[in-house]
Image (tube, rainbow, N blue to C red):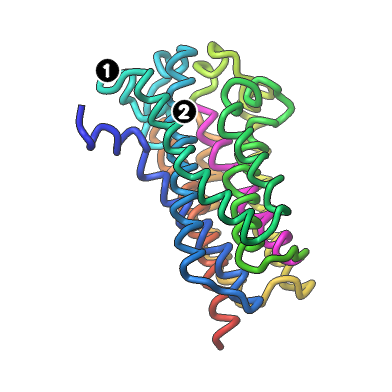
């Protein structure tokens, strides 16, 4: 057991999402005239710690429920494989995730004390999602597993970063944070399709289990297209700057992901679709952030 083992357990390839969320939230605040480099760095550290907690605790609960023992791992789904291989014990994984979260707590307390108690509800909701997502929210059905993922690792972080940097609510910032929620929801949704059988054994009630994989592909496609429609409407309604339309350059990846979602029985098509989906999730948000920065400086 080495530091490399712990590093792999964090699923570092997915931690890029936290960086992108911070870039987007900071860019929206910068566009509105707010920027604080030290606070931005603190937010990044805090969000990375929370994201590590999410990934490791997800691995722990999936292992304990037997899901990871039944699922077929891919580069995009099926967990880290560290517990299944025996490289790290379940107990150590649980404490790794819990300690990672606890290290983020002082950062949250600092922002509550310096920025205002209005941040507390966001931090409380985030805490509940971190520790009860696998044991409770994934078993509710009705789209709750996907909604909670989009809320906790999409909309709330972007909006929360804006609130921290600006010290005030903005309806336009809320509007701009919605695509992040949809995209992260979709990140989970497409990856749930190949995991449906294993998730069912673990007692989860994801959309592929409840509605079937074909209907889930339709929902996934609709949500993907909604992201681009949302951005266009935001620009047309003068809620978002016109330069955020550069996010539409990820449409080719979106069409590839949509096409592959309907061919979920064919691994040779599903895996590239999952890869394209990740590109959509990360690049769309990154380009939105770049759009806000360019709109400010040009």
Residue at 39 percent of width and 14 percent of height: 69
Q: How many marks?
A: 2
Residue at 65 percent of width and 44 percent of height: 151
Residue at 56 percent of width and 88 percent of height: 298
Count residues near mark 1 (Cα–Cα under 10 Å), then give few for <14, some for 14-19, many for 20+: few
Is residue 152 shown left or right of residue 250?
Answer: right
Q: Which residues are magenta?
A: 172-194
Residue at 40 percent of width and 26 percent of height: 95
**Image coords of residue 100 (percent x, y):** 43, 38
Q: Which residue is mark 2?
A: 57
**SS class, disc 2:** helix
Count residues near mark 2 (Cα–Cα under 10 Å), then give few for <14, some for 14-19, many for 20+: many
Q: Tell me if I can see residue 1 in this picture.
A: yes
**Image coords of residue 134 (percent x, y):** 57, 24
Give the farthest residue toward the front. 113
Q: Tell me if I can see residue 269 in this picture.
A: no
Indicate whether 118 appears above or below 139: below
Chief secondary structure of the magenta portion: helix
Return the residue nearer the eye: 191 or 11: 11
Indicate whether 129 appears above or below 205: below
Return the residue nearer the eye: 66 or 2: 2
**SS class, disc 1:** loop
Q: Quadrant of residue 82?
A: top left
Return the residue nearer the eye: 231 or 80: 80
First of labels 1, 2 by sequence position: 2
Q: Residue 86: which numbered mark, if any?
A: 1
Q: Classify the position of the N terminus by image quarter.
A: top left
Q: Quadrant of residue 234?
A: bottom right
Question: Does the magenta run of residues contain 251?
Answer: no
């Amino acid at each position: 057991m080495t530091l490399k083992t712990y590093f792999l357990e964090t699923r570092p390839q997915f931690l890029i999402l936290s960086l992108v969320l911070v870039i987007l939230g900071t860019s929206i605040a910068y566009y509105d005239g707010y920027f604080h480099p030290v606070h931005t760095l603190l937010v990044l550290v805090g969000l990375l710690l929370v994201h590590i907690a999410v990934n490791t605790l997800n691995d722990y609960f999936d292992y304990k429920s037997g899901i990871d023992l039944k699922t077929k791992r891919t580069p995009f789904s099926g967990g880290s494989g560290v517990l299944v291989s025996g490289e790290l014990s379940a107990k150590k994984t649980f404490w790794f995730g819990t300690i990672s979260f606890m290290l983020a707590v002082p950062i949250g307390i600092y922002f509550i004390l310096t920025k205002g108690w209005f941040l507390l509800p966001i931090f409380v909701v985030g805490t509940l999602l971190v520790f009860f997502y696998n044991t409770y929210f994934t078993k509710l059905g009705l789209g709750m597993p996907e909604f909670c993922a989009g809320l906790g690792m999409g909309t709330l972080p972007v909006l929360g970063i804006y609130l921290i940097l600006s010290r005030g609510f903005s309806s336009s910032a809320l509007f701009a944070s919605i695509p992040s929620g949809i995209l992260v929801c979709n990140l989970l949704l497409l990856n749930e399709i190949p995991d449906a059988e294993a998730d069912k054994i673990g007692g989860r009630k994801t959309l592929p289990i409840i509605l079937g994989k074909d209907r889930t592909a339709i929902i996934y496609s609709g949500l993907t297209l909604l992201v681009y429609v949302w951005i266009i409407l935001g620009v047309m309604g003068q809620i978002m700057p016109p330069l955020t339309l550069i996010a539409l350059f990820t449409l080719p990846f979106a069409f590839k992901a949509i096409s592959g979602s309907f061919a979920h029985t064919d691994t040779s098509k599903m895996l590239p679709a999952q890869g394209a989906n990740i590109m959509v999730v990360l690049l769309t948000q990154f380009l939105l952030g770049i759009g806000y920065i360019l709109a400010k400086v040009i």
